[in-house]
Amino acid sequence: MGEVVSGLAVFAVVIAVGWALVRFGAVPAGSDTILTGVCFYAATPALLVTTIGGADLATVVSRATLAGLLAETLGIVSAWLVHRLALRRSVAESTIGALAAGYVNAANLGIPVLIVLLGDATAIAPILLLQLLVISPAAFAVLDVSTARGAGPGPAVWTAPLRNPLLLGVVAGLVVNLTGWDAGAAAGGLVANSLSTLGALAVTLMMLSLGMSLAASSPRVTRRLTVARVTRLRATGPGADGPSSGGGEDPGAGGSDGGVGGPEGSTDRGERGAVLWVSVAWKLVVVPLLALGLGAALGLRGPALLVPITTAGLPSAQNVFMHATRYWAAKPLARDCVLLTTAGFVPVVLLAAALLS
């Protein structure tokens, strides 16, 4: 328990530093975008290569990771059924609600959380593979059919998971591990040292980026944007700054399918609130409990259960909001669920650690 609290304290301090850098004007708002890009395209793939390349694959393909995979899969499927059958939402909104209830932020938060709390991020690799190779394509297929938006996404969208730098990092790490290739001997150690140096940046940059993004969303920091940016916003009008500006919604995105219509697409505020809280509760309570039950059924006991519970309790990924935006389906639900689960996952991890220690 003490190690978990200490790890979360470090996590919180570095996030707070990122927040303060933007809040007090040391770096401009929007700097998190640059750090996120560095992590996504360079630091995190390098970390995955070095971590998986030197890992014992028995820990990657273990009962703990199996419990996490099953919990996420069952969580998404069961959440879809609840949204569709009990809450009577449309197919598209049920899909977004299910993703919000189960699709985790495996890269930006999963990797640093596992490293800080458990000292090893290899358990996140199977989660990344599941989400990139199975869940995302399946979600695209369902949303494409249910929203009937012309020809739907083109080849570039369907093949995007295969070009994802994180997936490439996982695959490269597996190749290094399985072939036994000695990266330390390549080019006089240049390859191994370069990967290690880049990978060492990943966790710190991710946490700083999260803090910066939190600060950049506050009204005070928004007022500190440059004159040119403010002028552009005034010229183009409200809502021109992307999906999150002022909480604006696309036509028909008010909690339904953005034009799919029908009685299932009700925009009643009370119904939307109920759907949101079901998704949040599913993500923070039901899916971690599934991980606990599945882990126990697989023979895990005590601290060993913390791995699947932690991966299951990770907040909803921002990719869910991207899917909702692409298909104009339940954008407010996706946006609010990402925010609330990001705020709520720390108590879940602390409670799990207290009970299992």
Image (tube, rainbow, N blue to C red):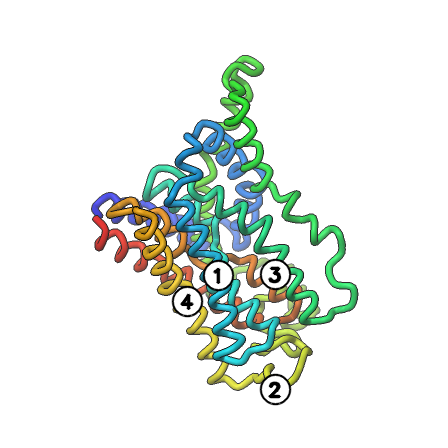
Which of the two labelled residues, at mark 3 and mark 4, occupies the earlier sequence position? 3
Q: Position of residue 256 (x, y in %)?
A: 59, 77
The residue at the point 45 percent across, 44 percent down is 124
Disc 3 element: helix
Judge whether 257 appears above or below 160 on screen.
below
Question: Relative to the observer, which residue lies in front, 153 or 298?
Answer: 298
Q: Estimate the spatial distance between the alpha carbons at disc 4 and disc 2, rounded to whole Å.
A: 25 Å
Q: Estimate the spatial distance between the alpha carbons at disc 3 and disc 4, rounded to whole Å.
A: 18 Å
Instruction: Residue type at mark 2: give it.
Output: Pro
Which of the two labelled residues, at mark 4 and mark 1, occupies the earlier sequence position? 1
Disc 2 element: helix
Which of the two labelled residues, at mark 1 and mark 3, occupies the earlier sequence position? 3
The residue at the point 65 percent across, 70 percent down is 328
Which of the two labelled residues, at mark 4 and mark 2, occupies the earlier sequence position? 2
Instruction: Residue type at mark 3: give it.
Output: Ala
The residue beneath circle 3 is 139
Q: Position of residue 162 (x, y in %)?
A: 65, 44
Question: Relative to the observer, which residue lies in front, 312 or 225?
Answer: 312
Question: Which label number is shown at residue 282?
Answer: 4
Q: Estimate the spatial distance between the alpha carbons at disc 1 and disc 3, rounded to whole Å.
A: 35 Å
Q: Are marks 3 and 2 in contact (CB under 8 Å)?
A: no
